[in-house]
Structure formats: structure tokens, C-alpha cells
Image (cartoon, helix red, strand yellow):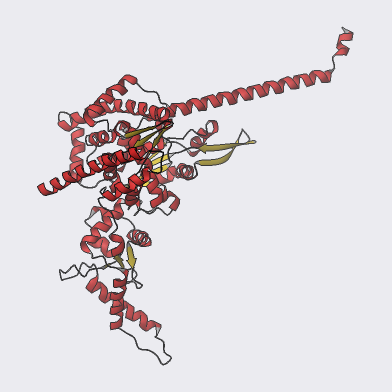
């Protein structure tokens, strides 16, 4: 025994134990990393291939094909009328924007703005509850900033392809409550990444690096029509609730809460059917993420979409969002597309009906923000737009009537010029300004206005009354050239006029024309599609356009 003891060195035993401990520690670490990787992969697959009830999905597909020709957006617009009054286009628009996020195409913000009691919260609830599967919605209600960030410790892609719902942020208390999380989401949408370090351990002895990644969406309501943050404005799609028929909306809500009427029965029948819809939508998401790996969705009508987005504050970014929304529109209605099999790839090309329906759907929320468009259209009815040259000519003409004396040194006294300009502006506003005290009925010479008299004269128009800071909106429109202002103020306020050249280019109801088709055919030539196939597609488009023009002409004649 004594010999054996001498043979074993204490240092060797210590080394052996330490080596075994390190091996065990590394094994545990690698096992944890493996488990974490597997969990993250499982979580990722749940988003790409969500579980669904196949039987219910098939049931709904039969309904969709039988009653709506397989068009999901037509279905959503139709069923929305049984859920909320006069918001079918807005709901379909928001749904398409949500699907851009769910399919991982873009991260963006969806803002529903309007004054109190315009139905912002109700629209958000209806879209999320009725049309979006629960797996893709993350409600921040009662969530702290710390618990929100903790999601990224185990899985950086936890929020990837998720819609983060903030509800209505119109109330200042509500906004302050969610501001820390909202700021994180803003950075995540802007950069596709958010990094934060925080201390861990009982005594904060170590640092944890939290990383959030992915394409994320935010859905919220607000009363603020103008954000100071250009990064946010450029990544936001704006929607305004329809304020018409308010009494009808109140009656509609009342009917939904009372048994034994047609609206109540339709509402609950639709609610049941929408459970099938969600199962079908999940099956479509699975197909898109699996089947369409070798499918390219083409949008040869990019120039047409550019025309309806060009009046936007950030036209390039909005054009991109609308382009992505149109691609989603096409893959959701795969069976109605023109399909070109090109060996390694399948090209999906829209027919004319699809682009026409899409433009009709998005036109109200594309280009100018809805409240900007409403404001300009209202002003156009009361004010005659003029060119910059004519506005300057009118102002200078007034100034000449009050020319000041010139002093012996050959220059005008500053105070005299100021007095002259004030008197000129006063006369100009009395004769050519939008003024509630005007006695004559001649509207042909009204060109000029200030933010306060617009507010006062249009105080009964809801779309204008809802604008909190009219001067700020005017400044924004002036920067883009839709409004111009005179060099002199009326009192303390700027004097504006509608720029005739820019106002002409505002597109109210964009209609696909022969020029659009020519551009679309040219666009197709950039892809590996042979000339014969392009000619066949072009002929199909031409026939569809002629048919739609005949129907439109017949409709106008009947009217």
C-alpha cells in the first residue's frame, strides 16, 4: 500500500480533476448551445411553417374559390362590412401591409391616425383578431422594457416576422408607458438590429449582451399627424379611418350587440367563418415559404405604382412598400396569375384585373397622406391655384401702389418698405384672400390663405378640423412644392397659395392606360422570358384593357 501511495502524485490528481471538470463544463456548454440552437430553429420553423388544421383550411378554400374566385383580398373586403362599417379598403390595406412583415419582406410601421372617437382602436382590434393568426401578433400590453429585451437573450430572432401591437398611442400617458419599447422597435425596424448590454448576477458581476434581429412590424394608432422624426415617417404607412356616416357607425355597433337582426346574424356567421380563414392563411404561409423558393414574382407595373406614390413625403420608400404589398397580393392569389415556367424558375406575372384592383385598393392611402389629400381637395374647391410667377406679379403689383419715398442717398428707408408691404398684404388678403368677411361671391380671384382662416372657414369639415398643427402641415406641403408662400406675412402668419403646376400632378383616381401597358411590356424584356411569351401576355393585357374601357364607357353613358 505504501508503495502504491508513493506512485500517485497529488499534483497529478489535481490536474486530472481540473481537466475532467473543464471537459465536463465544455460538454455542458456545447449541449446548452446545441439545445438553444435547436429551440431557435424550432421557433423559426413555427413562423415559416405554422401548424394548421388541414380539414378547416380545405373547407375555407372551397368557399373562397366558389364565392370569390380564389381572391383573398376580395373576401376580406366583403367580410369587413359585417365587422365594421365603411372600413373595408382600410382593413384590406392594413392586412396586406401586415403580410409584408409576416412573410419577412420588409420591416415597417403601420400608423392609423385620427382624432378621438374615429375608430382607430376598433380597426386595429378587428384586423388582428379576425384576419391575422395569433402566432404572428405580439401585444405589448403590460409588458416592461426589461421583459421585452429578455426575449432576445435566448433568441435574437424572437420578434422576427412579428407584428408588435401598441394599440392606441393617442393618449400621452399611454405613449409614455410604451415609449421605451416603442423606441427599441423603431431602431429594430430602421436597422434590422438592436444591441443593448445589461448587467447580470446578484451583484451585477457580469455583462449580458442582448441582440435583437429581424424584420419587425409595429401597428399603432395616434392623433399626431406629423412626427418630427424623418426616419420614422419614411418607414411608416399611414391610414386614416373613414369619418363619414358616423351616425351609421353608431347604429351599426348597436345592431351588433342586439340579437335577432340581419347584421347580428351576419357578424357571428362571419366570425365563425374567419376561424377557417386563419387556418387557410397559415396553410398559404407554409406554401409560400416552401413552394415559392424557386418562384419569382414580377411586377411589370412598377412605373404605375411609382405614379401613385410620387406625391408621398418619401416616395422611393413608399414605392418599395407598395411594390412588396403588390407581390404579396399576387402570391396570395397565385391561381389567378399568369404563370411562366422557365426551367429553373417560375415567373408569376399579374393580369390587368389584379393591378387595377390593387391600385383602387391602395390609392386612398398612397402618395399624399390621407389628411393632406383631403385638405388640398377641400382648398381646391374654394381657392384657385396659381403659378409662382403670377403670385409674385400680383404681390409686386400691390406693392407698387404704396411705393415709398427714396432718401437723398438713393436707398429706401427700411421702415417705409415694411409699412408698404404690410399695407399691400392687407389689401391683397381683402381682395384675393380666403376670408370669411368677403361680401362678393366671385371665387375666381381667391388665391391666398393663412392657416388660421383655413381652420376657421373649414371648422365644420372633420378631415380639416382633426389637424392639430395646421401651420406645420402647410410647411411640410410647401417643402414638397404643393404650397408656396409670399415673402411677407399677414400679421404673424405666413400667406400661402396653391402651386398650380404641382397641384395638377396630384393623382386622385389613377387608371391603367395604354402607356402603362407599353412600360410593362418593356419591363418584362429584362427577364429571361422569350419574345413570344411577352407578346402573348401583352395581347392578354390589351384585350383586358379594351374590355374594361368598354364597360367604363357604358357605365358613364348610363349615368
Name the residue rendered at 36%, 46% in the picture.
Answer: 522
Question: Is residue 496 among what the camera can see?
Answer: yes
Say left or right for 415 vs 256.
right
Name the residue rendered at 17%, 45% in the picture.
Answer: 550
Residue 339 location in percent, x, y? 34, 33
When the figure is inspected, residue 251 is found, relative to residue 64, above or below; the finding is: below
Which quadrant would residue 226 be assigned to in this image? bottom left
Name the residue rendered at 32%, 73% in the picture.
Answer: 392
When the figure is inspected, residue 305 is found, relative to residue 160, above or below; the finding is: below
When the figure is inspected, residue 340 is found, relative to residue 427, above or below; the finding is: above
Residue 196 or residue 51, whichever sits in front? 51
The residue lying furthest to the front in this view is 532
Question: Is residue 365 among what the camera can see?
Answer: no
Say left or right for 186 vs 339.
right
Residue 152 or residue 306, whichever sits in front? 306
The residue lying furthest to the left in this view is 558
Residue 230 or residue 207, whichever sits in front? 230
Amino acid at each position: 500500500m505504501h508503495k502504491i501511495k508513493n506512485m500517485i502524485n497529488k499534483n497529478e490528481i489535481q490536474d486530472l480533476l481540473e481537466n475532467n471538470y473543464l471537459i465536463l463544463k465544455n460538454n455542458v456548454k456545447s449541449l446548452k448551445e446545441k439545445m438553444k440552437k435547436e429551440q431557435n430553429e424550432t421557433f423559426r420553423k413555427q413562423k415559416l411553417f405554422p401548424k394548421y388544421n388541414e380539414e378547416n383550411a380545405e373547407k375555407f378554400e372551397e368557399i373562397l374559390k366558389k364565392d370569390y374566385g380564389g381572391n383573398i383580398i376580395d373576401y376580406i373586403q366583403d367580410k369587413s362590412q359585417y365587422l365594421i362599417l365603411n372600413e373595408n379598403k382600410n382593413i384590406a390595406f392594413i392586412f396586406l401591409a401586415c403580410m409584408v412583415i409576416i412573410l419577412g419582406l420588409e420591416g415597417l410601421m403601420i400608423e392609423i391616425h385620427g382624432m378621438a372617437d374615429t375608430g382607430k382602436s376598433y380597426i386595429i382590434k378587428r384586423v388582428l383578431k379576425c384576419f391575422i393568426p395569433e402566432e404572428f401578433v405580439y401585444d405589448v400590453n403590460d409588458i416592461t422594457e426589461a421583459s421585452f429585451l429578455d426575449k432576445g437573450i435566448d433568441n435574437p430572432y424572437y420578434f422576427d416576422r412579428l407584428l408588435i401591437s401598441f394599440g392606441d398611442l393617442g393618449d400621452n400617458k399611454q405613449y409614455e408607458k410604451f415609449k421605451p419599447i416603442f423606441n427599441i422597435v423603431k431602431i429594430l425596424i430602421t436597422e434590422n438590429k438592436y444591441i443593448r448590454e445589461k448587467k447580470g448576477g446578484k451583484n451585477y458581476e457580469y455583462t449580458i449582451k442582448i441582440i435583437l434581429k429581424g424584420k419587425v412590424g409595429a401597428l399603432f394608432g395616434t392623433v399626431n399627424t406629423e412626427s418630427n422624426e424623418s426616419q420614422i415617417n419614411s418607414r411608416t404607412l399611414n391610414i386614416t379611418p373613414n369619418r363619414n356616416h358616423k351616425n351609421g357607425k353608431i347604429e351599426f355597433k348597436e345592431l351588433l350587440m342586439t340579437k335577432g337582426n340581419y347584421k347580428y346574424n351576419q357578424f357571428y356567421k362571419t366570425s365563425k367563418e374567419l376561424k377557417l380563414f386563419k387556418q387557410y392563411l397559415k396553410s398559404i404561409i407554409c406554401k409560400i415559404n416552401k413552394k415559392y423558393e424557386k418562384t419569382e414574382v414580377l411586377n411589370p407595373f412598377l412605373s404605375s405604382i411609382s405614379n401613385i406614390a410620387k406625391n408621398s413625403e418619401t416616395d422611393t420608400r413608399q414605392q418599395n412598400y407598395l411594390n412588396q404589398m403588390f407581390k404579396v397580393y399576387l402570391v396570395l392569389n397565385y391561381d389567378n396569375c399568369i404563370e411562366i415556367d422557365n426551367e429553373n424558375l417560375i415567373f408569376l406575372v399579374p393580369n390587368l384585373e389584379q393591378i387595377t384592383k390593387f391600385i383602387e385598393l391602395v390609392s386612398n392611402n398612397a402618395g399624399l397622406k390621407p389628411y393632406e389629400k383631403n385638405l388640398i381637395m377641400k382648398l381646391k374647391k374654394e381657392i384657385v391655384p396659381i403659378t409662382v410667377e403670377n403670385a409674385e406679379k400680383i404681390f409686386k403689383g400691390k406693392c407698387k401702389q404704396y411705393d415709398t419715398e427714396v432718401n437723398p442717398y438713393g436707398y429706401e428707408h427700411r421702415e417705409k418698405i415694411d409699412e408698404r408691404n404690410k399695407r399691400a398684404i392687407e389689401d391683397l388678403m381683402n381682395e384675393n384672400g380666403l376670408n370669411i368677411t368677403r361680401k362678393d361671391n366671385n371665387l375666381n380671384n381667391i388665391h391666398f390663405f393663412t392657416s388660421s382662416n383655413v381652420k376657421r372657414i373649414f371648422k365644420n369639415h372633420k378631415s380639416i378640423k382633426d389637424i392639430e398643427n395646421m401651420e406645420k402641415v402647410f410647411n411640410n406641403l410647401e417643402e414638397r412644392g404643393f404650397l408656396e408662400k409670399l415673402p411677407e406675412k399677414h400679421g404673424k402668419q405666413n400667406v400661402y397659395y396653391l402651386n398650380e403646376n404641382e397641384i395638377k400632378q396630384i393623382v386622385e383616381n389613377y387608371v391603367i392606360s395604354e402607356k402603362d401597358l407599353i412600360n410593362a411590356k418593356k419591363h418584362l424584356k429584362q427577364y429571361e422570358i422569350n419574345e413570344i411569351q411577352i407578346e402573348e401576355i401583352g395581347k392578354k393585357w390589351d384585350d383586358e384593357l379594351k374590355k374594361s374601357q368598354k364597360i367604363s364607357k357604358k357605365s358613364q353613358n348610363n349615368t
